[in-house]
Image (spheres, rainbow, N blue to C red):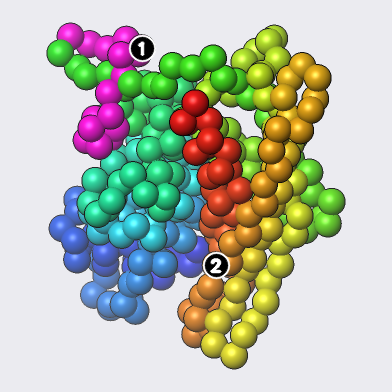
Amino acid sequence: MRLPSPALAISVRLFLVGVGAVSALAPLPAMAAPRARIEDVEESLARDPSFKVRVDAALILGRLGQRRSIPALVGALRDSNPGVREAAADALGLVAEQAADFSSAPTALPREALLAALQDSHPAVRRAARAALRRLGITDEAQPSTPGEPRIRRRRTDTSFEVKAIGDPAHAAGPVLQSHMRDFLAAQLRTVGEVDPGDRRGTYAVDGVIKNLWLDTTPRDVEVTCAVQLVISRQPGGGVFMMTNGQATVQKPKRQWRPQLRPSMELEALEAAVRSASEELVTHLARR
């Protein structure tokens, strides 16, 4: 994996100055770096070797409040550094709060990611996730809290899911995206039931497949397209309950395209395809 250049870290610092964030980094050099773009900050959040730069990048994206940054911030909730995860949780709350329609599909992802972050091993990350969810008006009566602190309400249901390993018959995605699809699918399903209930088998088994993942070029854009399929079976017995498909395409103008953007585009396309495929199931079970 190519690490970001020093110019990219300087771009993050330029953003810090522009949006008024506080940075622990040294003052900028006299020579100005090229004008920073939000894509550079998102890339720095995902790839910069300095956790301080990644923390600053998350804070910037939260202050900018652009919905396009949600996938990058969700990915940062899996960062190896708890400070980055904490900053990402806080930023997700800010971005989702500024979204015009939080209940719509494009803004459901931060809610689900923040609910999953309540199980983080680091207390500061859990507190940040809880604060972000409170900012969005979500409370939980099932979670312990300090006196006077609202709780995060989770749906109570007898429905549960056993999510199987994700298939990749075309060998186009690889183990990292397969693992991410399973995690992201589990986050979608947690809104209507329990996922992987330990020794108990779920009331439904969910098999997922990344049918294809490819990159294409048009006269104006570079596109990444992902197609997935979900097969939901009742347990015990194994009878098929529902089969759904999803496909999504993410585009970048050719003038903005760089090979290192492909992994983040694949991730975004995968999540959109899974969200599309799982929407019918989630909607059906939510109405029961």
> Identity of the amino acid at label 2?
Val
Query: Does 134 appear in magenta?
Result: yes
> What residue is pinned by disc 2?
250
Is residue 21 toward the left or the right of residue 120 in the image? Answer: left
> How far is disc 1 from disc 2 in space, using C-alphas?
38 Å
Of labels 1 and 2, earlier in sequence is 1
Residue 170 place in picture, x, y as percent: 83, 57
Q: Secondary structure at mark 1?
A: loop
Q: How many residues crowd around disc 2 within 10 Å: few (fewer than 14), some, or many (20 or more)? A: many
> Identity of the amino acid at label 1?
Ala
Q: Which residues are magenta?
A: 132-147
Query: Does 202 appear in magenta?
Result: no
Residue 110 place in picture, x, y as percent: 39, 42
Which one is nearer the viewer's eye here, 278 or 18? Answer: 278
Residue 89: mark in rendering: none
> What residue is pinned by disc 1?
142
Which one is nearer the viewer's eye here, 37 or 241? Answer: 241
Q: Most extreme residue toward the bottom, as rendered?
A: 219
Above or below, comparing residue 147 to residue 23 in the picture: above
Above or below, comparing residue 52 to residue 4 in the picture: above
Q: Main secondary structure of the magenta part?
A: loop
- The answer to whether any part of residue 174 appears in the image is no
Q: How many residues crowd around disc 1 within 10 Å: few (fewer than 14), some, or many (20 or more)? A: few
Residue 111 place in picture, x, y as percent: 38, 38
Q: Most extreme residue toward the front, as rendered?
A: 288
Image quadrant in which the N terminus is located:
bottom right
Is residue 5 toward the left or the right of residue 163 in the image? Answer: left
In which image quadrant can residue 154 be found? top left
Residue 241 place in picture, x, y as percent: 70, 33
